[in-house]
């Protein structure tokens, strides 16, 4: 039967794009499988991985640990490196053949290149950079009760969406929640008229769960054809960054610096490093610091940088513009040090100290050292 | 040879955000700016223009006041602009938007040695989807996250930035490239172009102008043509107000360290 993205009933199962680079699985793939397992359970369907690459059979065998029932493996020298056209062709053909109802990708640079291209070709909807996914309506409503300021009346009334004179029951649709406008607004998106319902999911947001008893995971090798003619781009080289990138997403403690360090840039960064060392964390920064070239771009927290969820986030000399808050306001505990008592960062900080970071930070380092030694 | 750059006018998120009681954005009370990443795409295009002498065309979809943004871009050195505007287009999600922009770009015309450039993503939605979706609709190769672009004849060599390094790619024109802020520093407007910006051509394309294009169909544009729909939009609850600690001396930092320790945070 011809493929038709509007024929909702013909689609089944939850798929996760398992991204690997140079034969190593990206950690987000495991997070997505764990989240996908939850969705598949709610729908009572299979969780399937789709894995593309060259000589990747071993990686596929591991995925049962994260709840996959099946893995579709596309193994070819043509797929060794990521190319938009090669990966899009395989994924679109696979979707047309096996018809998953849900397909999720990590919102990595590659996922965010690939997913929109696939959604456009498959004529379906894609929601970018999700931070929360639900199928089950009662669960979704509980989530709203906790995470929104919507009234109970609005929340309990959800269930049907009226579009162009037709009611669509979205009780079993994927509800895809994402931040917009730098996190000041959240929106839940649905894709009621087309399948698969597609989403990219922000790295580091979903919890990886390793199952005690791995699923018996069936590995499937579907037929496919790729030739040189399928490619418009040529990969000349793949280079790993020589400098080790700072791991903001995995860090439990982050000490970030902002424009407040301008009177002594090196000194300010050194203080942040010392405090980060004492806490066992890493150094982040605001956009201004990266734009000024004081720290490399991988340190940037915020809307155009990384979104982080550490246990403790210390903001030194950061005013806390909306675009910065977007990347850090879900941190466990936020501590702000700023000379300006009206700085917006104090509105979201759990603990604030109004003062000069160059004076306060050395004292704070001492106080934390002392407390840690006493323990 | 020409370079077509897609741009968007967006609310400024570097300041404070105004939200209406119903959870929608109060756009009227906010400043609009040219989307920052789009300025990097404009700069990349103007850079190639300086080097190769090509034409640079800016295109945007938006309400009529977006003309102001296009005039600003022409005051930076952009040669021509296209404003895609019409109420039939409103409510479009990224799929429908890319469909309309692709139809407009295709109607304007793409030649063998042309490049389409976009910013990586717009700061209002942060989706980064319209670039790749337009490329698909136009049937062109795409390279996103470009951190370096070199052109020789009909070949572009591009560094595609990844989280853990980069990939160097070679691609033939015509193609679509999305640009990141590390690519360059956008230039300012200049006197000559400021003086001439109102003489430069600005074409308006409305639904009538595009309706016969094969990509244009009531079922693929606007709200009706958008596969995704907003179920709810909401503001997160305000965090319980934090505490500003008294003072800024040793007693204060000791107090803070004590609290963190008592709560087993450190």
Image (cartoon, coloured by chain):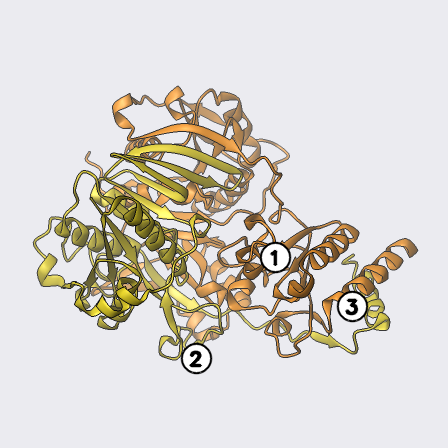
Chain colours: A orange, B yellow
**Furthest-front residue in this view:** B192
The residue under label 3 is: A359
Q: Are marks 2 and 1 on the same chain?
A: no
Which residue is rendered at x = 26% and y = 41% of the image?
A121
Q: Nearer the observer, disc 3 or disc 1? A: 3
The residue under label 2 is: B21
Percent from the top left, x then y, of residue A191? 33, 54
Which residue is rendered at x = 31% and y = 40% of the image?
B142
Mark positioned earlier in the residue sequence (3 or 1): 1
Q: Are marks 3 and 1 on the same chain?
A: yes
Q: Disc 3: which chain?
A: A
Q: Which mark is residue B191?
A: none
Q: CA distance from mark 2 to mark 3?
A: 41 Å
Q: Return the residue nearer the eye: A164 or B117.
A: B117
Percent from the top left, x then y, of residue A188? 41, 61
The residue under label 1 is: A285
Percent from the top left, x then y, of residue A148? 50, 69
Q: Disc 2: which chain?
A: B
Report whether A166 appears left or right of A101.
left
Q: CA distance from mark 2 to mark 1?
A: 32 Å
Quarter location, residue B223: bottom left
Q: Return the residue nearer the eye: A322 or B192.
A: B192
In which quadrant is the C terminus of chain A drawn?
A: bottom right
Q: Secondary structure at mark 2?
A: loop
């Amino acid at each position: 039967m011809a493929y038709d993205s509007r024929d909702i009933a013909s689609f089944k199962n939850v798929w996760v794009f398992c991204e690997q680079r140079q034969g190593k699985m990206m950690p987000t793939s495991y997070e997505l499988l764990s989240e996908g397992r939850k969705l598949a359970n709610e729908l009572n369907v299979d969780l399937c991985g789709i894995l593309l690459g060259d000589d990747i059979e071993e990686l596929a065998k591991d995925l049962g640990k994260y709840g996959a029932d099946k893995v579709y493996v596309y193994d070819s020298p043509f797929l060794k490196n990521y190319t938009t056209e090669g990966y899009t062709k395989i994924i679109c053909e696979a979707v047309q053949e096996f018809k998953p109802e849900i397909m999720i990708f990590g919102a990595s640079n590659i996922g965010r290149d690939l997913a929109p291209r696939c959604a456009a070709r498959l004529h379906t909807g894609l929601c970018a950079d999700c931070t929360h996914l639900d199928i089950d309506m009662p669960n979704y409503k509980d989530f709203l009760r906790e995470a929104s300021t919507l009234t109970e009346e609005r929340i309990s009334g959800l269930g049907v969406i009226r579009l162009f004179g037709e009611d669509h029951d979205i009780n079993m649709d994927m509800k895809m929640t994402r931040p917009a406008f730098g996190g000041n607004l959240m929106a839940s998106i649905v894709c009621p008229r087309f399948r698969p319902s597609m989403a990219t999911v922000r790295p580091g947001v979903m919890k990886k769960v390793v199952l005690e008893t791995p699923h018996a995971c069936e590995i499937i090798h579907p037929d496919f054809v790729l030739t040189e003619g399928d490619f418009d781009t040529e990969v000349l080289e793949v280079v790993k960054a020589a400098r080790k990138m700072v791991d903001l997403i995995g860090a439990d403690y982050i000490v970030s610096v902002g424009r407040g360090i301008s009177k002594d840039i090196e000194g300010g960064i050194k203080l942040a490093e010392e405090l980060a060392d004492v806490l066992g964390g890493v150094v982040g920064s605001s956009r201004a610091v990266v734009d000024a070239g004081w720290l490399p771009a991988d340190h940037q927290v915020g809307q155009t940088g990384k979104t982080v969820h550490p246990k403790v986030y210390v903001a030194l000399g950061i005013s806390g513009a909306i675009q910065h808050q977007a990347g850090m306001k879900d941190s466990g505990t936020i501590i702000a040090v700023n000379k300006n008592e009206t700085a917006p960062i104090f509105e979201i900080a759990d603990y604030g100290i109004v003062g000069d970071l160059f004076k306060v930070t050395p004292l704070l380092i001492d106080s934390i050292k002392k407390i840690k030694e006493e323990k | 040879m020409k370079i077509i750059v897609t741009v968007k006018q967006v609310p400024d998120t570097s300041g404070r955000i105004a939200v209406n009681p119903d959870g929608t954005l109060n756009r009227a009370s906010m400043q609009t700016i040219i989307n920052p990443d789009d300025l990097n795409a404009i700069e990349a295009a103007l850079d190639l223009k300086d080097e190769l002498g090509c034409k640079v065309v800016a295109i945007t979809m938006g309400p009529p006041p977006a003309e102001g943004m296009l005039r600003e871009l022409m005051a930076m050195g952009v040669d021509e602009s296209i404003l895609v505007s019409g109420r039939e287009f409103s409510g479009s999600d990224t799929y429908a938007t890319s469909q309309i922009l692709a139809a407009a770009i295709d109607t304007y015309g793409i030649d063998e040695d042309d490049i389409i450039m976009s910013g990586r993503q717009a700061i209002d939605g942060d989706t980064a989807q319209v670039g790749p979706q337009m490329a698909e609709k136009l049937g062109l190769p795409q390279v996103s996250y470009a951190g370096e672009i070199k052109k020789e004849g009909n070949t572009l060599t591009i560094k595609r930035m990844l989280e853990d390094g980069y990939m160097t790619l070679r691609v033939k024109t015509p193609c679509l490239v999305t640009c990141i802020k590390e690519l360059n520093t956008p230039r300012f407007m200049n006197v000559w172009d400021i003086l001439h910006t109102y003489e430069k051509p600005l074409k308006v394309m409305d639904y009538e102008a595009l309706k016969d294009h094969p990509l244009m169909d009531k079922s693929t544009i606007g709200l009706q043509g958008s596969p995704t729909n907003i179920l709810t939009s909401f503001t997160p609850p305000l965090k319980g107000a934090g505490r500003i600690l008294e003072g800024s001396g040793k007693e204060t930092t000791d107090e803070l360290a004590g609290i963190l320790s008592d709560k087993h945070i450190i």
